[in-house]
Image (cartoon, grey):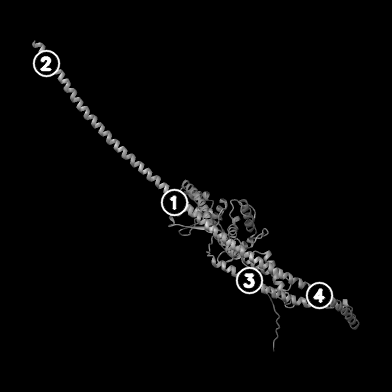
Amino acid sequence: MGTITIIIICIGALILGAALSWVVSEKLLGQKTRAILSEAEREAEVLKQKKLLEVKEKFLQLKGDLEQQVTQRNNKLKQIEGRLKTREQELTQRHNEVEKRNQEIDILKEKLALQSEGIELKKEEYDVKKAEYEEKKAELELLRQSEQKRLEALGGLSADEARERLIESLRAEAKDQAQGYINEIIEEAKMTANKEAKRIVVQSIQRLATETAIENSVTVFHIESDEIKGRIIGREGRNIRALEAATGIEIIVDDTPEAIVLSSFDPVRREVARLALHQLVQDGRIHPARIEEVVSKVRKQIEEEIIETGKRTVIDLGIHGMHPELIRLIGKMKYRSSYGQNLLQHSRETANLCAIMASELGLNPKHAKRAGLLHDIGKVPDDEPELPHALLGMKLCEKYKEKANICNAVGAHHDEVEMESLIAPIVQVCDAISGARPGARREIVEAYIKRLNDLEQLALSYPGVVKTYAIQAGRELRVIVGAENTDDSSIATLSAEIAKRIQDEMTYPGQVKITVIRETRSVSYAK
């Protein structure tokens, strides 16, 4: 009995514990469930708020885009309305002009009708006067014949003989008068032409700022002390030989203090040598391998500078569409001189003068400026063909697709080819102006003296010339003729012939004035 009771009690306790456990677990599960549900509700609320914000932002964005599109369309509509109004105004204006022209045409028609009526009346009057003229002409012919017969009977000369004598006397008189008229016309033309030409030339020169640039075949490289000379020469002259071989110039190291002379007819090579020496002296490392390295770098630098100079030149002058090879040759002009005048400065100066003169004469200034810049391009070719620089420049311009009038102006500026456009004489004149201004060019003394002698001998070759004097540095020629062999009317012809021959046979800067002097002197002595 006691055992059964204990068992029952144990079973009841187990049942009770199980029930309590179930109740506790249910409560815990309910709390967890409620917590999960509340968390899910919060997340759903957050997600809901987030989605609402996104929808609002999207709505605002779409609203802004729509407003912008509407604004753009409104602007376009306003522009179209403005264009339509402008077009309407233009059409109205044209309509008024057409009506005005129609009125003018009607007025002209009325005037033409009146004029045609007047012409008919004048034609009738002309016919009447013509008939009267024919009658009077016949009467005059009869009178002339009768008078001629009477004069032949009185004078003893036939009509043909009298006519010949009269023509001969009139011819001599007309010849004297014609020579006087010719001289007057020539002087008047000279005064007018010289005045206008001087105005254009002076105005062109005044508007162009120039500078004198003189170069030669020698460059002096200055050094701080004579100790550097020994380092440049090197052991047994190895450094200077390597430098001469790399640059292609002659380096003269003499007793001149703090100076080394670089001699070459090629200015590009002299510039390469000068810059290479400058870098070597600054660096301090002077040996054959270093010399070759520096010279190679400097040569590349000079090539880049040549191209950059060409580009800067065409940009400064406002020239477009030029071939890169021509631009490179223009940059190469910087290192070339002609008669002591820097070729690039001379070409720029000529280009500006050509543009100014062309605009003054009503021609195309861009074409003139282009031709002026390229006129001496034949002096800086990469090779040295046996052609005059003008013809070589023309071939280069033709090769790189320049216009025909520009090519002709380049080739004709020294009269190697015939001038085919009005730009050609402008280039020729501006080239002479640039080379003839004081300080622009240097001339060798021997060539200068020879030119003066040639001037004097050329004038002495004419009959009747007694003495000649070339003055004003060859810019004026005084010719003295004998009074017994010439007359006053022939000296004008003589001066023109001498000027024409000088122009055809000689080369000179600027212009040469020819003055012919004829005088008669009678000397007596009172004793």
Ranked by sequence position, the earlier of labels 1 and 3 is 1
Amino acid type indicated by mark 1: Thr
State if disc 3 and disc 2 touch (CB < 8 Å). Answer: no
Q: Which of marks 1 and 2 is nearer the N terminus?
A: 2
Gap in angstroms between the C-alphas marked 3 and 4: 53 Å
Residue 106, horizontal then vertical, whole percent: 66, 66
What type is the residue that disc 2 sits on?
A: Ile
Q: Which of marks 2 and 4 is nearer the N terminus?
A: 2
Question: What element does badge 2 sit on?
Answer: helix
Q: Which of marks 3 and 4 is nearer the N terminus?
A: 4
| Mark 4 → mark 1, Cα distance in angstroms | 84 Å
Give the number of the disc on residue 9: 2
Which residue is nearer to you in this view: 403 or 25? 25
Residue at figure coordinates x 22%, y 27% from the top left:
29
Report crowding for label 4: few under 14, some 14 to 19, many 20 or more residues within 10 A (C-alpha).
few
Q: Do the residues labelled 2 and 4 touch (CB within 8 Å)?
A: no
- Few, some or many C-alpha atoms within 10 Å of disc 2 (few <14, some 14-19, many ≥20)? few
- Tag nearer the camera, 2 or 3: 2
Q: Quadrant of residue 56?
A: top left
Q: Residue 194 has which mark?
A: 3
Q: In which quarter of the image is residue 456?
A: bottom right
Badge 1: how crowded within 10 Å, few (<14), some, or many (20+)? few
Mark-to-mark CA distance, 1 and 3: 68 Å
Image coords of residue 375 (percent x, y): 60, 58
Q: Which mark is residue 128?
A: 4
Badge 3 vs badge 4, beta-carbon distance below 8 Å: no
Q: How far apart are marks 2 and 3 (CA)?
A: 152 Å
Snapshot quadrant of residue 258 = bottom left
